[in-house]
Image (tube, rainbow, N blue to C red):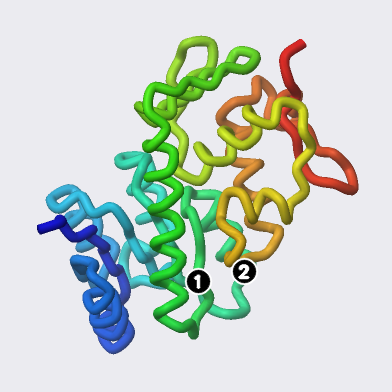
Amino acid sequence: MEERIKVLVVEDETSIRKFLAINLNRDGFEVIEAASGEEALDIITRTQPKVVVLDLMLPGIDGFEVCQNIRKSIPNIVIIMLTAKSQDMDKIMGLELGADDYMVKPFNPLELIARIRANLRKIDNAKGQLNKIISLREFELDLDAQKFYKRGIEIELTPIEFSMMKMFMEGNNKAFSRDEILNIVWGKNYFGDMKTVDVHVRRIREKIEDDPSNPRIIETVWGVGYRLKGAK
């Protein structure tokens, strides 16, 4: 029997948490529940879930701090945050701290499940390309080991960041529009906004650029989007 994928739902409102748990269980996931940030961090160290559905407004340690702690300890975990409808800054900050995706309350649980599966597929697709190494400039992307190196030194990337670097390195000087990036990295059925792309590009720049405030590797192509400057 195939092992079920573990999803940790971190939500302090019991009715919402139970509703999500019922729908995720029904779709074949193994669901673990946490009502606070402290409880979530304790559970993660013991159970190692593959996905965390994380409400930002939590008692005690809030979702931002939880997200940051999770990302530092488990780089390859998928984090989907839950935000209030009007809080655009919450979305941006959550993505900056390492979330892969977000859902705005209220939402259809079927859309959440679709987002979870899309993020998991990105990881599986990359792993399926065994023994493939992409090299460009001073960078190396090991698709088998899911590792990224700059000048031989490993840099930890989230699954979304890894997918974006794969796209940029395979493009080698190609300018990608924000729409193209959303379609390639998040999937054609993703209905997020363009800010998601900008935030993730900024996060990658902070990790790979010698001077992130003056990027020389991932360039902004005005009126189009972004490109990774290819080999000289």
Residue 191: mark: 2
Looking at the image, is 176 positioned above or below residue 106? above
Between 101 and 68, the residue placed more toward the observer is 101
Residue 52, picture quadrant: bottom left
Looking at the image, is 81 positioned above or below residue 75? below
Q: Answer few, some or many: residues within 10 Å of disc 1's Cα (few below 14, many 20 plus, some between 14 and 19).
A: many
Looking at numbered disc 1 in the image, what kind of residue is underneath it? Met
Between 213 and 166, the residue placed more toward the observer is 166
At 58% from the left and 40% from the top, the residue drawn is 164
Dot 2: what SS? loop
Position in image of residue 188 (x %, y %)? 61, 61
Residue, far left: 1
Disc 1: which residue: 103
Position in image of residue 5 (x %, y %)? 23, 58
Looking at the image, is 69 positioned above or below residue 228? below
In the picture provided, is 80 more to the left or to the right than 36?
Answer: right
Looking at numbered disc 2 in the image, what kind of residue is underneath it? Phe
Residue 136, picture quadrant: top right
Position in image of residue 104 (x %, y %)? 53, 76
Q: Answer few, some or many: residues within 10 Å of disc 2's Cα (few below 14, many 20 plus, some between 14 and 19).
A: few
Looking at the image, is 185 positioned above or below residue 150? below
Residue 179, picture quadrant: bottom right
